[in-house]
Amino acid sequence: MLKGIYTPSLATFLNDGGINEGELRRMINWLIEKGVSGLYPDGSTGEFIRLSFEERKRVIQIVAEETRGRPPHSPTPVRVLTASGAAGEKQFRAVPASKPT
């Protein structure tokens, strides 16, 4: 059973529209330091619909690299987890499920 606070994490962008990887890493670590129980990258904050599949995979890879098991749960959409390889690394213990739109 999942307990605690699971927060959507924003994707951060550069002026040219690319992912600001440094700021994303800083934000992920800040959220963890502040005590969130889990992260929901590419979640319900809305910007994910503007990301390509490859960009979504990159966000998941960055989150997996930065969390390194802290916090223990980092849910994210199954399709991106599988494609990014993070699911195979067992870095994520839970995934949300929602019906297709």
Image (spheres, rainbow, N blue to C red):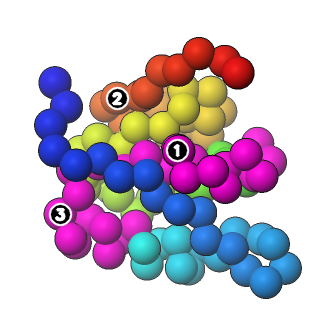
Picture quarter containing residue 12? bottom right
* Label 2 secondary element: loop
Name the mark on residue 35: 3
Amino acid type of disc 2? Answer: Ala
Residue indicated by mark 2: 94
Q: Residues within 10 Å of mark 1 (few under 14, many from 20)?
A: some
Residue at the limit of the structure toward the right, as seen here = 16
Amino acid type of disc 1? Answer: Gly
Residue indicated by mark 1: 43
Residue shown at 46% from the left, 58% from the top: 9
Query: Percent from the top left, x then y, of residue 86?
Result: 50, 39
Picture quarter containing residue 65? bottom left
Query: How far separated are the C-alphas under marks 3 and 1?
Result: 19 Å
Q: Can residue 81 be seen in the rendering of this structure?
A: yes
Q: Is residue 6 above or below residue 99?
A: below
Residue shown at 77% from the left, 71% from the top: 18
Q: Is residue 91 above or below residue 61?
A: above
Residue shown at 31% from the left, 31% from the top: 93
Query: How far separated are the C-alphas under marks 3 and 2?
Result: 18 Å
Position of 24 with respect to 66 (left or right) is: right
Q: Is residue 29 above or below residue 90?
A: below
Q: Can residue 90 be seen in the rendering of this structure?
A: no
- Looking at the image, is mark 1 or mark 2 nearer the viewer? 1
Q: Are marks 1 and 2 in contact (CB under 8 Å)?
A: no
Query: How far separated are the C-alphas under marks 1 and 2?
Result: 13 Å
In magenta stretch: residue 52: yes
In magenta stretch: residue 30: yes
Q: Could you tell which of marks 3 and 1 lies nearer the N-terminus?
A: 3
Magenta highlight range: 28-54
